[in-house]
Image (cartoon, grey):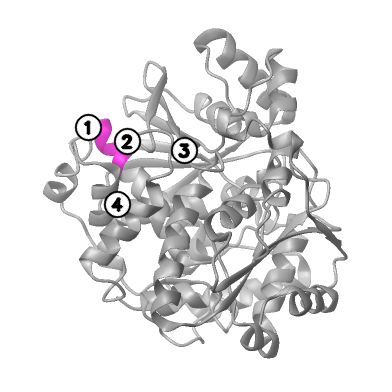
């Protein structure tokens, strides 16, 4: 299995090389050269399998000879042993043909744990074999950072620096990043929004002298291994509802487009998915783009669903790569226009491809709060604001006989203020996190300045 850059000018890499590289040296994102296929019979055989068994079957064709079967099975087992539900990603029924996929039973209570716990084990196995040390730099709108810190805290061969937008994450999200005591993890509160954090991380990767000197590695969803891990729960959820013998649809609360792109990969592999619905909050650049209005940034407005407060959705580049028939030059031109002009128009042919694959919708702040209140009143289900955005968008779609699965991306206790305002009930943290608000915090506030950030990393990282 070989991996190519979405911008067409970087070396072709193996799975392990692409995983350890993160962002391609031409600024693009790595994608598989070809997409492995699963037959209906192979998908049907997933019925009754454990989550770990399904994960091995689905991901194995993508990793090539990076790990033996036994090594990969052990990596998967370690990745998910700390989850709080035996099913890992259980389904809950919300309505007659509407289901919620609970993705918040991992150690940091968010869907990012499915990918980050796996990539942590993959990195550890690879680094133990090579003896190399790496510096992980990541940007987060809230959940990626805590998941990354949880996955890599205490590891000898890894230093972790996570940039998050100062004042724009929930208190629980912040504390999950700032309370770990291990000296290899560093939470950096940046003066700016998530797009600024993401831009500075990309700048570091494109500063090759710094990148090579510190052994920079990335665990944002720019890293293909992150996307790959998320493909698995699309299969397990669909099979639970009758796939491959009937199609299913998914609605995905979406900020950086990685989670919905994983669904696209599942569909490309042969999973019978009818609709893939992108659900955005008031920062609705993806909804506008998929509605034919061009991909044009308009600034970020803080919301009660902060993990979706994004205008530059990195993984959308992977979708554009396929929509433009894998023309790396065309994608590179679009990304140049985004950087210089703040947006770009999508060609008619590419729009047709995207519209055949993705639908979209948006939910306002008021609609999000109302959805939390309604679901609590009618079903007793407490939704986090991001999950509520997905449920709201899904509920507005035309009635269909195809089951709809909305992804519940975070535990409501990560956003207690928004949930309490909507329901009158403050969701408690799990017992293992009950002392979260009493723990001491360790955080460094940084300016939105590449030179200063790089200097801090050079100073703090262990030789």
Q: Quadrant of the C terminus?
A: bottom right
Secondary structure of the residue carrying tag 4 is helix
Q: Of the residues under marks 2 and 4, which one precedes in the sequence? A: 4
Q: Residue furthest top?
A: 377
Q: Is residue 201 above or below residue 207?
A: above
- CB atoms of marks 2 and 4 within 8 Å: no
The answer to whether residue 304 is seen in the rendering is no
Q: Of the residues under marks 4 and 1, which one precedes in the sequence? A: 4
- CB atoms of marks 2 and 1 within 8 Å: yes
- Binning the other alpha carbons within 10 Å of mark 1 as few (below 14), some (14 to 19) or many (20 upward) gives some
Q: Give the Cα separation between the discs numbered 2 and 4.
A: 19 Å
343 or 433: nearer the viewer: 433
Total tally of numbered discs in the picture: 4
> Which range of residues does the magenta coloring cover?
236-242
- Percent of width and height locating residue 145: 64, 54
| Magenta region, main secondary structure | helix
- CB atoms of marks 4 and 1 within 8 Å: no
Q: Residue furthest bottom?
A: 209
- Residue drawn at x 46%, y 64% is 323
2 vs 4, front mark? 4
The residue where tag 2 is placed is: 248
Secondary structure of the residue carrying tag 3 is loop
The residue where tag 1 is placed is: 242
Q: Of the residues under marks 3 and 2, which one precedes in the sequence? A: 3
- Binning the other alpha carbons within 10 Å of mark 4 as few (below 14), some (14 to 19) or many (20 upward) gives many
Q: Give the Cα separation between the discs numbered 1 and 3.
A: 20 Å
């Amino acid at each position: 299995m070989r991996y190519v850059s979405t911008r067409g000018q970087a070396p072709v890499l193996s799975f392990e090389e692409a995983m350890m590289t993160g962002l391609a040296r031409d600024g693009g994102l790595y994608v598989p050269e070809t997409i492995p296929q699963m037959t209906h019979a192979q998908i049907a055989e997933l019925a009754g399998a454990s989550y770990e068994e399904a994960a091995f079957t689905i991901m194995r064709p993508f990793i090539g000879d990076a790990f033996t079967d036994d090594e990969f099975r052990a990596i998967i087992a370690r990745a998910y042993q700390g989850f709080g539900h035996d099913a890992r990603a259980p389904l809950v029924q919300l309505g007659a043909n509407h289901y919620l996929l609970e993705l918040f039973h991992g150690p940091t209570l968010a869907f990012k744990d499915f990918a980050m716990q796996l990539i942590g084990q993959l990195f550890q196995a690879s680094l133990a074999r090579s003896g190399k040390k790496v510096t992980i730099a990541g940007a987060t709108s809230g959940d990626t950072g805590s998941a990354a810190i949880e996955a890599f805290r205490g590891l000898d061969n890894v230093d972790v620096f996570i940039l998050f937008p100062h004042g724009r994450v929930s208190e629980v999200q912040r504390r999950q990043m700032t309370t770990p005591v291990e000296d290899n993890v560093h939470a950096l509160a940046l003066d700016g929004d998530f797009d600024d954090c993401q831009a500075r991380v990309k700048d570091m990767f494109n500063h090759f002298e710094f990148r090579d000197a510190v052994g920079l590695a990335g665990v944002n969803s720019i890293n293909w291994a992150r996307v790959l891990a998320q493909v698995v729960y699309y299969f397990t959820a669909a099979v639970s509802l009758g796939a491959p013998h009937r199609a299913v649809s998914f609605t995905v609360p979406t900020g950086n487009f990685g989670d919905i792109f994983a669904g696209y990969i599942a569909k490309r592999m042969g999973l019978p998915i009818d609709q893939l619905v992108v659900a955005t909050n008031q920062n609705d650049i993806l909804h506008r783009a998929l509605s034919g209005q061009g991909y044009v940034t308009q600034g970020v407005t803080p919301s009660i669903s902060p993990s979706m407060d994004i205008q530059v959705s990195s993984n959308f580049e992977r979708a554009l790569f396929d929509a433009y028939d894998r023309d790396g030059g065309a994608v590179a031109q679009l990304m140049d226009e985004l950087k210089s002009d703040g947006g770009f128009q999508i060609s008619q042919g590419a729009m047709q491809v995207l519209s055949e694959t993705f639908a979209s919708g948006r939910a306002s702040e008021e609609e999000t709060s109302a959805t939390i209140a309604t679901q609590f009143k009618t079903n007793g289900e407490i939704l986090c604001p991001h999950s509520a955005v997905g449920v709201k968008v899904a509920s507005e779609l035309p009635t269909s006989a195809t089951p709809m699965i909305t992804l519940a991306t975070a535990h409501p206790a990560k956003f207690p203020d928004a949930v309490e305002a909507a329901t009158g009930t403050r969701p408690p943290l799990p017992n293992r996190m009950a002392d979260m608000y009493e723990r001491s915090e360790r955080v460094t506030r940084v300016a939105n300045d590449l030179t200063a950030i790089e200097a801090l990393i050079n100073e703090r990282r262990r030789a």
